Image (tube, rainbow, N blue to C red):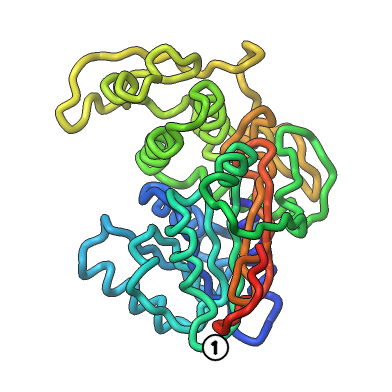
Amino acid sequence: MPALLELCKREIASQSEMPFKAIVYFSATADVNMAASTFRNLKEPGSSMFHRHPLEPTSIVELHARLTQDQRTKAAAMFRNARSAILFSSDVTSRGMDFPNVTHVIQIGLPQTRDAYIHRLGRTARADKKGEGWLILTDLESREGQQRLYNLPLYEDNSLQAAKIDMSQDAQMPQDLATILTQVIDASRMVRSTQKSAAYLAALGIYQWAPKGYLINSLNSRAKYCWGMEAPPSIPPGLASKLGYTRVPGANIGYDDDGPQDGQRGKGRATGWLQADGEQPEGRGFSAGRFDRGDRGGYDRRSSFGGSDRRSYGRSDSGMSSGNGYRGFDRGRQYGRGDRSASAGTSRY
C-alpha cells in the first residue's frame, strides 16, 4: 500500500497531459473495500480527519458486486464524470464498462487468469489516448505469474522508493517517504476490524496454491504491523478444516468476539500469534524522517503481505509496461511502466 500511495501522489503531482485518473484492481471484494477505506482515511500527520485530504482534488471511489445496483450506478457515474479520481474495483468493471480518460490501471496481486489481466488493462488508453498499466506482485506471486501470465513481456522497475523500505528495521529516510509510510499505517489502523478480517479470510481462498505456513505468517505480519491488530483475525473451524489450515502454526482457529456467524457452530481453538523466532512481535513507527521502533506497528521482514518490497508490471504502446510495486509481501518485485496508446504497436511489460 505505501508504494501505491507513493505512485498516486507522484502521478497526481506530475501534471501530465491528462489529470490522474486510475482504476486499482483487486481479485477479492474484501480487498477492494479494505483499500478504499484505507485511502479514505488518509490524512496529513498531526491533522484531523476534518482537514483537507492529502490527495485532493482526486476523489476516492469504490465499486464492486456487493454494492446495490443503485450504489454501483452512482459510483460508476461519479468516476466517469470525475476529472481526477481513483476507482478501487473488483473485476466487475473490467468488461463492458467504459470510463473516459483513464490514465492508469493498477493491478494489486496476481489476477486469477491471463484474460482477466488483459481485460483490466484494456480500461486505459482508449479512444486514441495514452495510458499506463501497473501490476504489483510479491516474489511468490511472481513465480506463479510466469506461468499464469505466459508470453506477456514484463520488465522490472524500481522507481518507487516505498517498495525498497524494510519496515521491520530502523532506518533514516527522506521526510516525504516517512510521511507516506506513516499515513498508510495510521489510515489502516482506523479501518474496522470486520473489514480486516474479511480481507484476511479472502486471501486464504485466493492463495490456496501458496505454501500454507508461509501464507499464514505473511497474513499475520500484515495484520500486526500494517493493520495494527493485537491478534490475527480468527479463521472459523469449518473454513480452516476445508482449506487445510487446522494444524498450521500461527493460524488463529476460532471465532471473533461475537461468536459464530452464518450458522457456524463449535468453539474452535485459537493459537494466537506465533512468530518464527518464538518471540512476541514488536511494533515500529516513524519519526521525523526516521523509521524507528515504536508502538504504531510496521511490517514483518520475514514474509509480510503488508510489508516488504513487491514487483509490478504495466503497459506501454498498446501493450504492457513496467511500474513500481509496493511492499506487500516479503521480497516482492515490481515490473512494467510506460504509456499505452490505442493504436497497434509493440507491447512492453
Q: Residue at x 64, y 39 (%)?
A: 139
83 left or right of 225 in image: left
Q: Residue furthest right?
A: 172
Q: Residue furthest front?
A: 151
Give the residue number, with chain letter if any, for mark 1.
Answer: 128
323 left or right of 230 in image: right
**Residue 296 figure quarter:** top right
**Residue 237 figure quarter:** top left
The one of 174 and 61 positioned closer to us in this rendering: 61
Residue 337, percent across and down? 68, 65
Residue 64, percent across and down? 33, 59
Q: Residue at x 53, y 53 (%)?
A: 108
The one of 317 and 293 positioned closer to us in this rendering: 317
Q: Residue at x 65, y 87 (%)?
A: 17
- Asked if 81 appears above or below 69 in the picture, the reply is below
| Residue 145 seen in the figure | yes
